[in-house]
Amino acid sequence: MTREPIYRRWRVTGMALLCAVGVLAGCATGPQSDPRDPIEPFNRGVSRFNDAVDVAVLKPVATAYAEVTPDPVRTAVGNFFGNLRDIWSFLNATAQGRAEDAAVTFLRVGVNTAFGFGGLLDIASDMRLYRVSADFGQTLGVWGMPAGPYLVLPIWGPSTLRDTVGMGVEASGDLVMGVGDVATRNTLYTLRAVETRAGLLRAGAVLDEAALDKYSFTREVFLQRRQSVIDSQRNRDAE
C-alpha cells in the first residue's frame, strides 16, 4: 500500500522521459521497426561506433591485461570492485523489498571488507554468502517506471531509458568518485573498465561467432534478461 504513490510518481516520470526521445523516434521509425527500439538507426550507429572503439582500443588493452596479469591479481581486482558494487546491491535490494537478499549482501560487504582486506579476498562466498545483483534501474522497474525505448549508449552499450536514469543515479554516488587524489581516482576508473572488458572477452568471442545480426541478438538478450529480473521480483511481491 505504501508503494502505490511511488509507482504513480515513476509512471508519470517515465512518460515524461519518453518525450525526450520523441523527435528521434518519429524520424527513425519504419514499418518493420521493433516498437521497443523506435530509434534503431540511431542506436545501430552508436553500436558501430562502440564496436570500432572496442576493436581499436578496449579489446587490445583488455587482452594484453588478461595475458600479463597473474590470475590471483586479477581475482583480487575483481573482488575489490565487486565489493563496491555489493554496497549498491544492498541499497537497491532494500529499496525493492528483498529483505533476505539485502541481509545477505550486507553480511557480504561486512565480511569481505573487514576480513578480506577491503574486499580483495571474497571470503563471503566461501561462507556461502553468494553475490546478489541489484541496481537502481531494476529498482525503478520494480517501483513501476516503464522501461522506455531501448538505447545504445556510447562506450557503455545496451541500455533503456529507465536503466540510463538508474546509471546516472548510481554514477553520482560512485565510491571511486570520492577518492580525493585525481591520479589514484583515474587509475581506479581505468582499472575497473579494463577488468570489466577483460571479463567479457570470452563472451564477446562467442557472440561474434554465433550471431548473424549482432545488434539484434544483443538487444534481445539484454531486454529479456532485464525484464525477467523485474518480473521475478514483482511476482515475489504478489505472493
Image (cartoon, grey):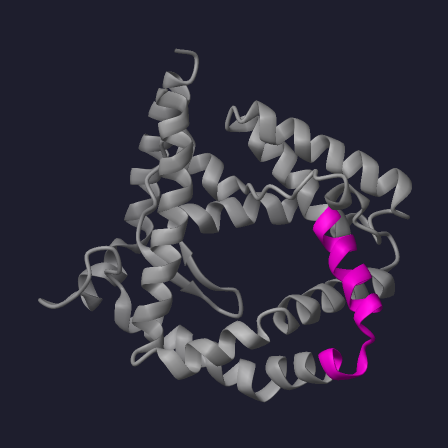
| Prevalent SS, magenta region | helix
Who is closer to the viewer here, 182 or 122?
Answer: 122
The image shows residue 231, relative to residue 163, as above or below, that is above
Q: Quadrant of residue 16?
A: top left
**Residue 63: x percent and y percent?**
67, 83
Decide if residue 9 is in sight here. no
Residue bounds of the magenta highlight: 65-83
Farthest residue toward the top? 1
Who is closer to the viewer here, 138 or 151?
Answer: 138
Q: Quadrant of residue 135?
A: top right
Q: Quadrant of the N terminus?
A: top left
Q: Measuring 33% from the left and 69% from the top, which residue is drawn there? A: 217
Q: Quadrant of the C terminus?
A: top left
The image shows residue 21, relative to residue 18, as above or below, that is below
**Residue 101: x percent and y percent?**
59, 31
Question: Is residue 25 left or right of 7 when viewed as pictured?
Answer: left
Question: Is residue 155 left or right of 225 when viewed as pictured?
Answer: right
Who is closer to the viewer here, 17 or 175?
Answer: 175
Q: Measuring 30% from the left and 78% from the top, which residue is drawn there? A: 213
Circle count: 0
Who is closer to the viewer here, 56 or 14?
Answer: 56
Q: Measuring 68% from the left and 42% from the top, which residue is drawn there? A: 86
Queried whether the magenta region covers residue 37, the answer comes back as no
Question: Is residue 209 left or right of 63 when viewed as pictured?
Answer: left
Queried whether the magenta region covers residue 78, the answer comes back as yes
The image shows residue 26, relative to residue 4, as above or below, that is below
Question: Is residue 186 left or right of 224 when viewed as pictured?
Answer: right
Q: Measuring 80% from the left and 83% from the top, which residue is drawn there? A: 68
**Residue 193: x percent and y percent?**
67, 67
**Residue 54: x percent and y percent?**
55, 81
